[in-house]
Image: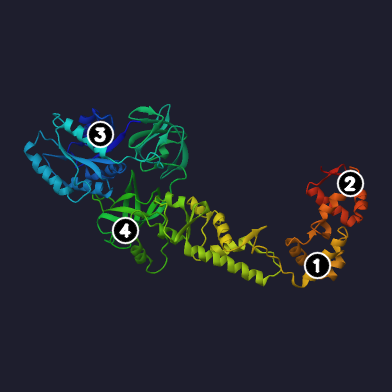
Amino acid sequence: MTETYVVATAGHVDHGKSTLVAALTGMEPDRWAEEKKRGLTIDLGFAWTTLPSGRELAFVDVPGHERFLANMLAGVGPAPIVCLVIAADKGWQAQSSDHRDAILALGITHGLVVITRADIAPDAVAGTEAQVRAQLRDTLLADAPVVTVSATTGEGIAGLVDTLDEVTASAPAPDLDARLRLWVDRAFTIRGAGTVVTGTLAAGTLRAGETVEISGEAIAQTAGVRGLQSRNSSAEAVVPHARVAVNLRDVPAEDIHRGDALITPDAWPLVEVIDVRRTMGVALDDGAHELMLHIGTAAIPVHLRPFDADHARLTLDRPLPLQVGDRIVLRSPGSRNVFAGVFVLDVDPPELNRRGAGRRRGQELATRPVTGDILAEVARRGAVQRRVLVRFGLQVPESLPSEVEELAGGWLVHSPALEVWIETARTLVGRLLKAQPLAAGVPVKAVVEALRRAEPPVPDDGTATGKPGAGPARGLVATVLSRAGLETVDGMVRPPGHQADLGAAEAGIAEVERRLAADPFAAPEAHDLRELGLGVRELAVAEKAGRILRLGDGVIVSPRTPAQAMRLLAGLDQPFTTSQARQALDTTRRIVIPLLEHLDARGWTRRIGATHREVVR
């Protein structure tokens, strides 16, 4: 598959960005009549070409005017490579700095600088290059190549093309298997095709026929991909880094807006609260609290709660598909300047309810590595599934910290928390069985509730999908009970081999067992049971322990009685009547009728008509 790359232009207004793109591609990037009339780029423009190496190159041409900084960020945000344009006759200007700051805030490390209009001010080229080097010193673009051209005469264009080939060749290879996140920059309708959205594909592979999830300001649904285009050509699949047009099924174009995203279904957390670290710009505790957040093509209001100069919590106006490691630009509403660039440290931060919690959280974040702290993430939750942390964008190493253990189901458990849960279960079961010696065990529900009240609590199964409330983590609870030396039988938790302590009723049950051993079909009468001190509770406990079997109408027999009856009934002529069964078992109708119904229910016998039964062979 042909390698594709996207380059976003940047730079002060009227420094020749659109003219440069047109010279490189032969395409006019300005799309609006007003843009062509005024000679001023207002919104994003798109053009493409093929480099001598065969690599395909798409340009996103962004506006340079300070009034359109939001549009500029929407164009540069998803792009992996940037081309900073400075006119030789004008030199470094205010918006040059603003665009440089935006590029730095977004963490873009690959790019180049083009000095344009060399034909107009040839004597100013060296001075302009010196300005560029000074302005980019100590930044991620300090070593970016600088190329001088004239888009009108063609001077230097061939060298620029070669440099673009070199820059794209050194760019890191995209992850073709990554989960999809395509930030939408346009949505429109094509007659006969329906809704089409466009964007820059930064990671993952998008295929025609698959289903995507749309996460947006006014929409949250899945949609089928009817077709794909890249560079005005149909494609069965597109890979990064490409400009792509996606034809979606059954979604009105008016429901999708710039800043919405197409994502892999059930693969991204949609978050409204994140904790961040400043990478550049104004100190986060400088006093601003209401800001605009820019990521990809999205621009939404956020509330900033500073922890210190470098760390803060952002509460978003609406959920976005974000992950640890995302780079975000913050700016004051209406400002042409970047307020700060931040790095996402946590997309599932803890609540801060106690006095001084913000200060303590800032201290925790200050020591957190940019790749995430797996021990801290697991310890805070007690247990979390590996795939949940991957969903958050964290790299989970195969070699885990010594205090983290991986259990069945991919559960990563903090060892101290596991010990708390084991002791909680063991203590609860021991205490309740001591208080209720007739009990066959402790209900699973009671044990689960105790584990969910522990500190830390056993998490819900819903933590695996980002939708808590799905009920207790059953696999994790089962492991806890096993580690506690407990078993679950018929919904009751108990020590292995546990028998209910019948206490004073033990003698009565033993007498019933003796009588039934002598005559299995002579079930004791109700007055016999009362005389032996056996009520409903004692009989229920004895049955749970496997010592008796209760049939209908209060008939008590041995658990071996049904099998003993079957041996005698099988010797009768088939089919047989209830009276014949009673005579064969030498018992009464009070006993034979519920016994036969029990055999029917187990499938050992079956009724034939109203009066006969037969043994099922």
Q: Are marks 2 and 1 in contact (CB under 8 Å)?
A: no
Of marks 2 and 1, which one's residue comes earlier in the chain?
Answer: 1
Of marks 1 and 3, which one's residue comes earlier in the chain?
Answer: 3
Secondary structure beneath dot 2 equals loop
Would you name the residue on which mark 4 appears?
289
Mark 3–mark 4 distance (CA, rounded to whole Å): 36 Å
Direction from residue 457 to residue 337 in the image, left or right: left
Q: Are marks 1 and 3 in contact (CB under 8 Å)?
A: no
Instruction: Decide: is 590 above or below 226.
Output: below
Q: Quadrant of residue 475?
A: bottom right
Q: Identify which amino acid the numbered label 2 is placed on.
A: Gly
Q: Position of residue 370 (x, y in %)?
A: 33, 54
For the N terminus, the quadrant is: top left
Which residue is nearer to you in this view: 470 or 381? 381
Would you name the residue on which mark 3 appears?
34
Mark 2–mark 3 distance (CA, rounded to whole Å): 101 Å
Q: Identify which amino acid the numbered label 1 is placed on.
A: Ala
Graded by Cα atoms within 10 Å as few (under 14), some (14 to 19) or many (20 or more), the crowding at tag 2 reads: few
Say the numbered circle drawn on residue 510: 1
Depth-wise, is mark 3 or mark 4 nearer the camera?
4
Secondary structure beneath dot 1 equals helix
Q: Quadrant of residue 144?
A: top left
Direction from residue 499 to residue 245 in the image, left or right: left
Q: Position of residue 358 (x, y in %)?
A: 36, 65
Of marks 2 and 3, which one's residue comes earlier in the chain?
Answer: 3
Query: At 21% from the left edge and 30% from the top edge, which residue is drawn?
Result: 24
Residue located farthest toward the left when viewing the structure as drawn: 123
Q: Position of residue 432 (x, y in %)?
A: 64, 69
Of marks 4 and 2, which one's residue comes earlier in the chain?
Answer: 4
Instruction: Decide: is 205 above or below 486.
Output: above
Q: Identify which amino acid the numbered label 4 is placed on.
A: His
